[in-house]
Image (cartoon, coloured by chain):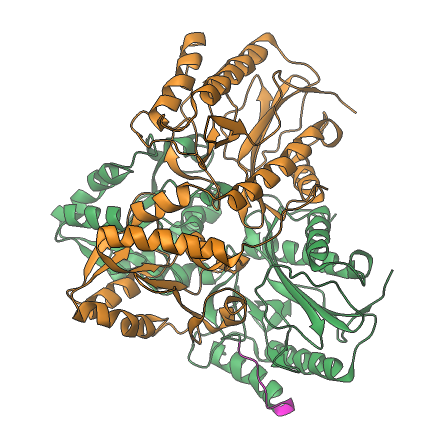
Chain colours: A green, B orange
Amino acid sequence: MLDSPVRGFLVGEFETRLERLHKLMSTKGLAGILLMSEPEVRYFTGFLTQFWQSPTRPWFLFIPVDKKPIAVIPEIGAALMRTTWIDDIRTWGAPWPKDDGISLLQDLLEPLLKSGARLGVMKGHESSLRMPLGDYERLMSGLGGIEVVDATDILHNLRMVKSAAEIEKIAHICGIASRTFARAGDIFHKGQSLAEAFRAFRIECLTQGADDVPYLAGGADQGGYCDIISPPSNRSLESGDILMFDTGATFDGYFCDFDRNFAIEQADDLSRRAYDTLWRATEAGLSTARPGRTCRDLFHAMAGVVAGDSDAVANAGRLGHGLGMQLTEWPSIIPTDRTVLEAGMVLTLEPSVETVDGRIMVHEENIAITETGAVFLNARSPELPIIGGR
Amino acid sequence: MLDSPVRGFLVGEFETRLERLHKLMSTKGLAGILLMSEPEVRYFTGFLTQFWQSPTRPWFLFIPVDKKPIAVIPEIGAALMRTTWIDDIRTWGAPWPKDDGISLLQDLLEPLLKSGARLGVMKGHESSLRMPLGDYERLMSGLGGIEVVDATDILHNLRMVKSAAEIEKIAHICGIASRTFARAGDIFHKGQSLAEAFRAFRIECLTQGADDVPYLAGGADQGGYCDIISPPSNRSLESGDILMFDTGATFDGYFCDFDRNFAIEQADDLSRRAYDTLWRATEAGLSTARPGRTCRDLFHAMAGVVAGDSDAVANAGRLGHGLGMQLTEWPSIIPTDRTVLEAGMVLTLEPSVETVDGRIMVHEENIAITETGAVFLNARSPELPIIGGR
């Protein structure tokens, strides 16, 4: 198992995040911001729990423009929240369907209403309202007249550029997944059902040091696979199959997100060529990735290689994306995304190509943007790895 | 590994679900219902993927009162959705921030607006809006005048009563978690860090046949633990510790949710008595649980036992809840929940008690309501298990 980075963050990290947030809030004229989604609450508090799996209770964090965050949370989370740097923790005995935190929020937000101030809420792309819509409508109606401003871009701008401590965690989990994939020849074999292969991958990834494997998708078929988001099919691995696993494993709340392709016992020429095309596309992506270039540039660099080799650019909707506290984050590597790359961003490069009979091959890498370019966070293989039978 | 039930469901199961939904919609005068959350989309389609981990793309299911569901989803999910019983699948090349499915929904919903019909949306307790709030507001403004009705109770009533095939999956994962806990003496030991114990539990649970372990919380300390939702602390297991693991493992998209307490090498009297109190509380819960009784009755049956033994009823907010496609579902075992129990419901019984110095012990079991009573879905231990050092 790899040596682990220290878990959690120093308080200074949270102070820096808050300071940057306060500046952006001032620029936008926001008196406060109301957050309720897991990554945002965690980003400003360090509150890390899988209990968000339970959809029963809402959790809130209110951040005034000039003060530390105030947690408004179910009593069941108070002990854990008290271990963070947050001092002001207000709780209620949830679940309480008639008033699940709404009165507490009303008390907190009324001063803003009275002073005619603006409240930020995340309403934009890639966000959800992680509370009952009816409760939100009731809260807003109780604050009739308060000006609500979409604060999504503020949060995206902040979280998009990772600190050194964040990148260390992402690099660590990328290393763990790389070592897991390096054992493919030991854990996958001809005749194995895909369900068994999924289980073997998860166990190996935990053994290598992952905290969890929240995302695992995969497929296998002759010359490629039909989609990249499915649970295991009933198929058993056959000679000549192209096997793909795409994993979002985590360490201390941070994700990797990359895939690997393997040929079972033998690879046909079309598969080798497809792999080579995708390899060169990611190389083109890497050499384009540096501060000042855009997501649009990355898209064209990779799409150009794929289009040069084939008429059939497969369409997964984009050729990569951000990652970090979530499996996928903004920006998107699409022609219309002109986000300018900055040192500290962490991205996937994810070109894909159609192979045969509507099947595809997808190759995904994780990179971090540095002051002078970009670096891969995961181990790589320039040729399609062939793994033998047992 | 246990023999697995067949994965997925027969089409008849989806037809029955739809038929029951249509009846409830008619009663409520709904012309259609718009769903967007993972369990609801899956419940009516069978669309099972971990890709919901990516928050980037919204997914929609529109169900007219007199027709089969219509999927409005990102292109990346089309291949998987085509493997389900759904015929009408409309896709777009997501992510497309300017129009992430909104035009497609607008086209679908406009006929309702024109006919003055009512649209159901989930807005109530335990629901979230799994799409950007700004997009929802834009959609509703484009449908200005459409009457939106909260459909949460319809979905809750439907999903709360499980079919035999659903209960088989839940019982299967409860069996897997039971066999994992039965190996506690082999996988946990004095001196082990909690992080290592978490990893060992996950690996054992996968080895026993779980698809995944999306929820795992735990704690350990002398005489109890401080909270029940935390990731592993830095503590190493010591003699006399009470170790608790609470797991939500999954099989084919269905959860178990129960915990187990263990004493490391030795148990003090207070811990034994606390365990005995909780054991008798769950026995009281089981003997109360049958069709016709309410969640309120269950609460009082269990709270009565705990209060009879101690002044200190610990408060996790409730003494149990529903489960199934989600780690926690309605109803809640609280004094104000008068939900009447029906055969087919699956619930947790989860009494807790304060032990010493603000520490607690929580004991959780999973039960299914039958025509004549209730049955435990997990293996049990009437005495606090003591596990030795290596």
Return the x and y of residue B257 as percentages of the image width and height: 53, 36
Query: Can residue B215 be seen in the rendering of this structure?
Result: no
| Image position of A68 with respect to B274: above or below | below
B228 vs A153, left or right, is: right
- Residue B195 belongs to magenta span: no
Spot occupied by residue B185 in the image (x, y as percentages of width and height): 73, 26
Q: Quadrant of residue A236?
A: bottom right
Position of the C terminus of chain B, as image quadrant, is: top right
Residue B24 placement, left or right of A388: left
Q: Magenta region, mostly helix, strand or loop?
A: loop
* Of A223 and A253, the residue lying toward us: A223
Instruction: State the image coordinates of residue A29 (x, y, percent, origin top left).
Output: 23, 59
- Tag count: 0
**The N terminus of chain B lies in quadrant:** top right
Front residue of B106/B46: it is B46
| Image spot of residue A58 (x, y percent) | 35, 43
Q: Residue at x 51, y 70 (%)?
A: B82
Left/right placement of residue A289 relative to residue B319 reads right
In this orientation, does residue B346 appear? Answer: yes
Farthest residue to the right: give it. A390
Q: Which residues are magenta?
A: A308-315
Give the vertical position of B98 relative to B226 (above or below): below
The part of the image, by quadrant, that contains residue A349 is bottom right
B369 is higher (above) or lower (below) than A158: above
